[in-house]
Image (cartoon, rainbow, N blue to C red):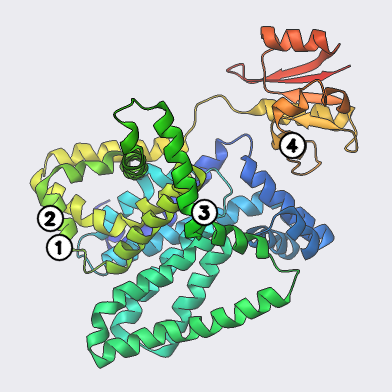
Amino acid sequence: MQGLIERARRVRPAYWAFAGSLLLSWIAVHFEATIAKDAALYLDAARVFNEQGFGATLAKFNWPWFSILIGVSQQLTGLSLESLGYLLCAMMMAGTCALMVDAVASRTPGGGAWACLLVLAMPAYNTFRGDILREYGFWFFSTLALWLALRWHARGGWLGGLLIAVVVATAAVFRLEAVMLMAALFLWLVPGLVAAQGRLRMLQLVLAPSLALLALLAILYANERLPLGRFEYYLALLDPRRLFANFNNATHQLGAILAKYSSDDASAILLFGFFATTVLTFVKLLGPFSVPFFFRDCRRAVREHMAQYAPFAWAWVLYFGVLMVFFVQQLFINSRYASFLNLLAVPLLAPALMALARRFPRAIKGFVVVAVLVMMANVISLSAKKTHYVEAGHWLATNAQRTEQIYQDDPRIAYYAGWGYIAPDKSREAAMSDKHVGSYRYFLLEEKAEDPNVQEWLQRHQLKILAQFANRKRATVLVIGR
């Protein structure tokens, strides 16, 4: 037994992170009964790519590269699209964990094990292990780019700089905001420009991407088939005029509901609210790993290691700015978007945990136990499964035709009917209105049959409940028709 323990200790922490990540992903998928809405879209786009080609896929989704990857993988392996989606996401997540741990282990002696605990237990991104998401590719290739940057900085070379740019471009194939990594690396290299070697490093990093960007812009505007819509969407988000207009509009709306003497401060209140909400979301998603920030020794450890992991720190700052722009433009933020902040913080949190272990050598064992419990809670779900979507989809496949006008609250119902991802063509209120209710053959609504409003609507339009499907917690899909 002692020999086995010794051999286990000699295994690099990055290998443990990779294997542990695959195990956690398998557990998470095992507890999933249905896929998420985004996953249904990606998988249906992959089906469209295999059956109808690129043009039809682009019409389905204007940034379809992840779906195309899944579709091509099916052509090569013959596995189901859903299995391949889960497998690709699990492999990319495992690679992300391994790279992050290796980045810490190679620069902070003794930090690899703590980084391994962090990447496997932090709630921010681990709670999504049961989903099929583009974020996994974004996380993996972004982490790979930063990992390569740390190695390249010591050696230099044109090939290394080009490889970093290619990896960042690949991350952008999954989520376009990955291009901010080039800006983060640029800012990282700026202090070194006073030396000839620093200027050479900067040139090696930015020359090839700059030329490639010019070529890409020329190709995009010369070819109407390429997905310009996604680029236009991001450019609109970054448009200062639209940004200030949306912020001023939100300020006026807030000012209208504030007390008379506070309305003049609505802009400051709103801006601080956006900032504080983003910070609190980051802290909340840390889970138990927010504890080190309460101690001065741990905060000092973060500052002392800032220079070692400067690319991650700069990427954190810029991505925080990306989230703030998105927040102002769209007026919401969610944990899936914010989780990349937590992933970028891992290299600096590992030294903080080491400092916490030195300060509390006995209590740290209890902290590790809590972290392991959180790790398992991230992937083990005992809540009621959303089987009502699957059952409603099967009813639809048996009793209706795809060509009929059908309103459904959740696109997954059509997906489980075998019809693909069909988003509602109208809002629920519009579809159920007197003007449009007669246009639909069936309604599949997430409602309780005994709801008085439902009963009144049924009587007014002479409709009836044809079937209903509920899960263990009585979340119900009603099938309504004539």
Q: CA distance from mark 1 to mark 4?
A: 52 Å
Residue 35: give x, y in percent of width and height.
63, 40
Q: CA distance from mark 4 to mark 2?
A: 52 Å
387 vs 403, nearest the viewer: 403
Q: Are marks 2 and 3 in contact (CB under 8 Å)?
A: no
Q: Earlier in the sequence, mark 4 or mark 2?
A: 2
Tell me the CA gap for discs 2 and 3.
Answer: 40 Å
**337 relative position to 8: left or right:** right
Question: Quick one: SS at disc 2?
Answer: helix
Type of amino acid at the residue the image marks with label 1: Glu
Camera-near label (2 vs 3) is 3
Q: Which mark, residue 424?
A: 4
- Element assignment for label 1: helix
Residue linked to disc 1: 304
Q: Earlier in the sequence, mark 4 or mark 3?
A: 3
Q: Amino acid at mark 4?
A: Pro
Q: Secondary structure at mark 4?
A: loop
Disc 3 target residue: 242
- CA distance separating discs 4 and 3: 28 Å
Q: CA distance from mark 1 to mark 3?
A: 40 Å
